[in-house]
Image (cartoon, helix red, strand yellow):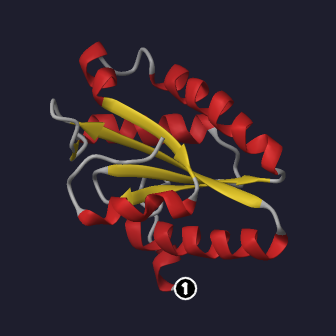
Amino acid sequence: MKGLASVSQRGAYNQEAFRSLLESESKRSERSGHFCQILLVYWTDAQGSIVQMDAPVAKTVIAAAFRSLRETDYIGWYRDGRIVGAVVTVLARESMAQVSTHLQPRLVENIRGKLGVEEISRLQIRVCRQYELEGLESGEGTLAVN
């Protein structure tokens, strides 16, 4: 797969490779009866619209994701420069809620102290299933997942 060779210096997959891995993992999850969730981290402006991350913020978020997730989870750009994503595999439906309740605080803790209060206040973290991503493709607007 051509895009899979495209990993940034920080170890995160580029958008093309990440989307390919997301699609592949979603199909595998459906066949196996296991589940996967998608972690999304993005920066917003005062109106709540998703905006380009500053390079230091992106570097911090990606590094925190690597510290927060397992080696088997995929980390990359869901939308280049704007949304960092991670594909998190889940073995049982019951553990899906645990992913959200444990992963988000761990990620925030790994980011805290490395970014200023204003930068952190602009970060949004969401955990969702792939079908919840449909509205995200429309562009710059807000992300409508919980």
Q: Residue farthest to the bottom?
A: 1
Q: Nearer the viewer, residue 123 or 49?
A: 49
Q: Is residue 10 visible?
A: no
Looking at the image, residue 117 lies above or below residue 39: above
Whether residue 118 sits left or right of residue 60 in the image: it is left
Front one among 8 and 102: 102
Relative depth, front residue between 97 and 44: 97
Query: Percent position (x, y) of residue 70?
Result: 70, 45
Residue drawn at the location 58% of the way across and 56% of the way down: 129
- Residue lying at the far left of the rendered structure: 46
Crowding at mark 1 (Cα within 10 Å: few <14, some 14-19, many 20+) = few
Q: Position of residue 56 (x, y in %)?
A: 29, 35
| Residue in the image at 25% along x and 42% along y | 53
| Residue located at (31% from left, 35% from top) | 57
Looking at the picture, does residue 1 appear above or below residue 109? Answer: below
Q: For this view, does 105 lie left or right of residue 123? A: right
The percent position of residue 87, horizontal first and vertical second, equals 60, 56
Q: Position of residue 54 (x, y in %)?
A: 22, 39
The kind of secondary structure element at disc 1 is loop
Q: Amino acid at mark 1?
A: Met
| Count of numbered circles in the view | 1
Residue 146 vs 35, above or below: the answer is above
Q: Quadrant of the N terminus?
A: bottom right
Q: Which residue is mark 1?
A: 1
Q: Is residue 28 visible?
A: yes
Residue at horizontal 41%, vertical 49%? 84
